[in-house]
Image (tube, helix red, strand yellow):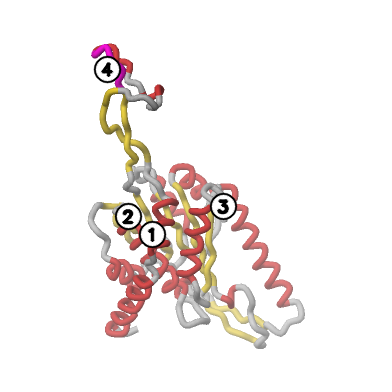
Amino acid sequence: MLPADLHLLIRRLHLRVRRKMQASLLGNYHTLFKGSGLTFEEVREYQPGDDIRSIDWNVTARLNAPFIKTFSEERQRTILLMIDISGSLNFSTEINTKQQILAEMAALLALSAVENRDRVGLLLFAGKVERYLPPGKARMNIPRLLSDILLTEPSDPRTNLTAALDFVNKLKLRKAVVFLMSDFLAEDYENSLRQMARRHETFALKVTDPAEIEVPRSGLIRLRDAETGQIRLIDTNQKSFPQNFQEQVQKRRREFERTLAAARIDSLEVSTVGGHLEALIRFFERRAAHPGVRS
């Protein structure tokens, strides 16, 4: 893609995401991601109706009158966007690639976080962590976020989820809300994922393409692995092909669902067909209406 074309794409994506920033989304975001804890505010004199469990007995004894401690919610949260930029994310049989779908969703999440004055961090990974921007107080630049996701060329195009998860697990990062965004075409990352989920509130956002779920019967097709470069010839007209392919698809799906259930992680699956931003908004609405219930 030419630089001018890419610039127009980023502007189009940014405007599209902006239009999806509805008041209902912001309200659901605020409800879903409450503050990370309580911070001490002041000591004041006890008033009828106050919770006696809040009485500060030291101050009460010293002043010979009942006083209580008051606390306020620490509203600001830490949000970390972990985004897969491996070779398989460039695949699509639709207009938008899987990478573009994740970029739009990341921008919508970042905008929601910024509007709520949350700290937002970004981690891009493929075969290794390619870029890490720690969560900070500075307002995240959404066009820059989109360009980082779409322009960063991974030094290793393969997917290594474990490396990215272990990187986060080693960070001295306060309890965060982590959005792990990928097609999850990876293996042996379960232990690292569970470790991260124990420490941070984690959500898995998975993107797929229709051709990864159902391959058309088109005879002999030549497939090139976007991450390894390996080329395979597959005869889709073979009698056993549809059944074997679907068995593999369902096996991967069951394994993925078991992995998330074991880590107690909620998830959302979207497709390159579209409707991903609307699906993300509905995800927020369901979570806000039924907190603690996995979608």
Among the two numbered marks 1 and 2 on one chain, the one whose residue lies closer to the N terminus:
1
Place of residue 195 in the rendered image (x, y in percent of width and height, measured from the top left):
48, 44
Magenta stretch, residue numbers: 63-67
Among the two numbered marks 2 and 3 on one chain, the one whose residue lies closer to the N terminus:
2
Query: Cα distance, mark 1 to mark 2?
Result: 8 Å
Q: Given contact means CB atoms under 8 Å apart, are the residues at marks 1 and 2 in contact?
A: yes
> Which secondary structure, mark 1?
helix
**287, 1: nearer the viewer:** 287
Q: Residue furthest bottom?
A: 219
- The quadrant in which residue 144 appears is bottom left
| In this rendering, the label closer to the viewer, 3 or 4 | 4
Q: Given contact means CB atoms under 8 Å apart, are the residues at marks 3 and 4 in contact?
A: no
Query: Cα distance, mark 3 to mark 4?
Result: 44 Å
**99, 170: nearer the viewer:** 99
- The quadrant in which residue 96 appears is bottom left
Q: Given contact means CB atoms under 8 Å apart, are the residues at marks 2 and 3 in contact?
A: no
Q: Which residue is mark 2?
A: 116
Q: Which residue is mark 4?
A: 59
Which residue type does callout 3 highlight? Arg
Among the two numbered marks 1 and 4 on one chain, the one whose residue lies closer to the N terminus:
1
Category of crowding for the residue at label 3, using alpha-carbon neighbours closer than 10 angstroms: few (below 14), some (14–19), many (at least 20): few
Q: Which residue is mark 1?
A: 26
Among the two numbered marks 4 and 2 on one chain, the one whose residue lies closer to the N terminus:
4
Place of residue 87 in the rendered image (x, y in percent of width and height, measured from the top left):
45, 71
Which residue type does callout 4 highlight? Val
| In this rendering, the label closer to the viewer, 4 or 2 | 4
Q: Given contact means CB atoms under 8 Å apart, are the residues at marks 4 and 2 in contact?
A: no
Q: Given contact means CB atoms under 8 Å apart, are the residues at marks 1 and 4 in contact?
A: no
Q: Which residue is mark 3?
A: 294
Identify whether 6 is placed above or below 33. below
Q: In the drawing, does residue 89 fall left or right of residue 123?
A: right
Category of crowding for the residue at label 2, using alpha-carbon neighbours closer than 10 angstroms: few (below 14), some (14–19), many (at least 20): some
